[in-house]
Image: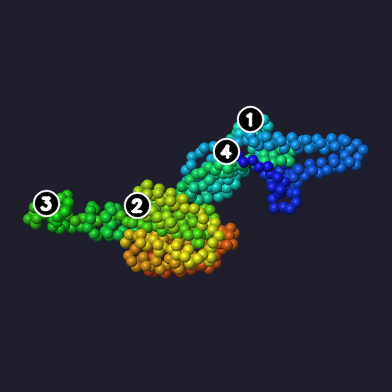
């Protein structure tokens, strides 16, 4: 525990005089909006001291002065002894939640001193929530007692590992002159897993060269329930494919040929470079892009397709199944939210930093003929880096899909909270409809994602309006 006495200077908030702003739960709060109680005691002490000098019965004033000082001294000692005997901590709780869950946090307060306390303020910091500052009134804490205070908060600040704490308990003596802060610096760590949303079925084109069984039928020879034709037996053909009825007609061994059922390989590239991000907390292009990526991952893995994930320095090789989805979801949730707090904008970055965040470095990892989903907030500066690689991938036989996040929508929603150092010109977002039409003309599928509509609406059709 860390114990700090709040000095007269600490109690003032952005003021040059003796007025200040204090704990809203203090019993002296209404007075402290105007003047701190210590000022009143100081004035009384000065008047008593002056009376002891200038009046004939000055000794009575002096006795009164001693009484005031004795009361203040006793209160100070009493509060210091009590503060050293107070313990606060979070009670154990489960450590895994999902986005949108409501969490009940329990705080235990123990008073091991011989003094009862009242007018106490408890403060906690619930970082998984959009409004992290929590304040709770504790009206009375008896001596040698223990109590628990509970509050409920919603996990609405995005996915990833979050902390709860530090805890702070502010106690005030009965005279209102002394305040002590007792801080428990042990944070409680919890993990917020993403809430994966459902999206409509995406039109995926599997590569004919795939050797993995799946739900897609291609014209190549393989092993599905669809008969493609018959042919003469060749060495290595499976005996179970021999048509014995046709083979008895004097044509030799005849083998049935079936169409090939394969799955697809889907590569998801998530551009989370901080230069293109706008918004705050869960209401940001950063969090929205992660939601889109995980929705695609979940759907394609359920279909049995192989899914790979790439973003910055995070690469997850192709795989499928529930465990693979969990692996990608954990990687995505662990990505830090540096994008919305960066002090750099797209106008201040260096050329080498731009190159590091481009689509080019992931091209060698794509299986020939596979699906590529590129998710990025729309910005004309970023488009100059990614447009040529996107067109080249399409010309090389890849099935290219681009999910543009409407940066202008986030700009309008968060214009008041965007740091001045991260401001970019709104003109960089205006050409989104024109760019979308141009890419679709070449055969690239473009989806337009906006916080003003759901992901189901976004992926309902590739020709959705802005």
Q: Nearer the viewer, mark 2 or mark 1?
A: 1
Residue at 45% in and 62% down: 357
Sequence-wise, which precedes: disc 2 or disc 3? Answer: 3
Disc 1 designates what residue?
Answer: 144
Disc 4 designates what residue?
Answer: 89
Residue 72 in the image, given as x and y percentages of width and height:
76, 37
Disc 2 designates what residue?
Answer: 319
Q: Quadrant of residue 441?
A: bottom left
Disc 4 is placed on an element classified as: strand
Sequence-wise, which precedes: disc 3 or disc 4? Answer: 4
Q: Residues within 10 Å of mark 1 (few under 14, many from 20)?
A: some
Residue at 71% in and 43% down: 29
Q: CA distance from mark 2 to mark 3?
A: 41 Å
Residue 375 in the image, given as x and y percentages of width and height:
43, 59
Q: Is residue 405 visible?
A: no
Q: CA distance from mark 1 to mark 3?
A: 93 Å
Q: Nearer the viewer, mark 1 or mark 3?
A: 1
Q: Nearer the viewer, residue 53 or 443?
A: 53
Q: Are marks 1 and 3 in contact (CB under 8 Å)?
A: no
Q: Are marks 4 and 1 in contact (CB under 8 Å)?
A: no
């Amino acid at each position: 525990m860390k114990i700090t006495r709040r000095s007269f200077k600490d109690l003032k908030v952005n003021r040059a005089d003796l007025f200040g702003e204090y704990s809203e739960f203090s019993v002296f709060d209404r007075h402290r909006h105007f003047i701190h109680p210590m000022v009143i005691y100081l004035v009384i002490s000065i008047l008593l001291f002056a009376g002891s000098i200038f009046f004939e019965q000055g000794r009575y004033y002096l006795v009164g002065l001693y009484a005031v000082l004795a009361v203040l001294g006793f209160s100070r000692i009493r509060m210091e002894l009590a503060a050293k005997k107070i313990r606060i901590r979070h009670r154990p709780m489960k450590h895994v939640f999902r986005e949108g869950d409501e969490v009940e946090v329990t705080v235990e307060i123990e008073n091991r001193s011989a003094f009862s306390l009242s007018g106490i303020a408890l403060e906690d910091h619930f970082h998984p929530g959009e409004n992290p500052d929590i304040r709770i009134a504790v009206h009375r804490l008896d001596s040698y007692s223990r109590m628990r205070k509970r509050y409920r908060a919603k996990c609405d600040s995005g996915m990833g590992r979050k902390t709860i704490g530090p805890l702070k308990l502010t106690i005030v003596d009965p005279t209102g002159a002394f305040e002590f802060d007792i801080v428990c610096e042990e944070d409680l760590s919890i993990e917020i897993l993403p809430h994966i949303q459902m999206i409509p079925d995406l039109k995926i084109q599997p590569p004919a060269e795939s050797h993995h069984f799946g739900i897609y039928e291609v014209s190549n020879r393989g092993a599905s329930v669809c008969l493609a034709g018959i042919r003469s037996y060749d060495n290595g053909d499976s005996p179970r494919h021999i048509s014995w009825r046709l083979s008895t007609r004097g044509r030799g061994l005849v083998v049935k040929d079936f169409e090939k059922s394969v799955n697809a390989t889907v590569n998801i590239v998530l551009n989370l470079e901080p230069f293109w991000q706008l918004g705050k907390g869960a209401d940001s292009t950063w969090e929205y892009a992660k939601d889109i990526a995980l929705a695609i991952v979940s759907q394609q893995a359920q279909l049995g397709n192989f899914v790979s994930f790439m973003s910055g320095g995070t690469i997850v090789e192709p795989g499928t199944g529930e465990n693979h989805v969990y692996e990608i979801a954990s990687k995505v949730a662990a990505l830090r939210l540096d994008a919305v707090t960066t002090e750099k904008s797209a106008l201040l970055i260096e050329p080498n930093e731009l190159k590091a965040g481009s689509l080019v470095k992931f091209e060698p990892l794509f299986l020939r003929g596979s699906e590529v989903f590129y998710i990025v907030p729309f910005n004309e500066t970023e488009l100059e880096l990614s447009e040529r690689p996107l067109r080249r991938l399409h010309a090389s036989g890849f099935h290219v899909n681009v999910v543009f996040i409407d940066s202008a929508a986030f700009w309008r929603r968060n214009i008041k909270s965007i740091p001045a150092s991260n401001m970019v010109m709104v003109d960089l977002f205006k050409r989104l409809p024109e760019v979308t039409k141009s890419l679709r003309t070449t055969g690239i599928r473009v989806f337009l994602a906006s916080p003003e509509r759901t992901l189901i609406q976004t992926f309902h059709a590739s020709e959705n309006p802005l």
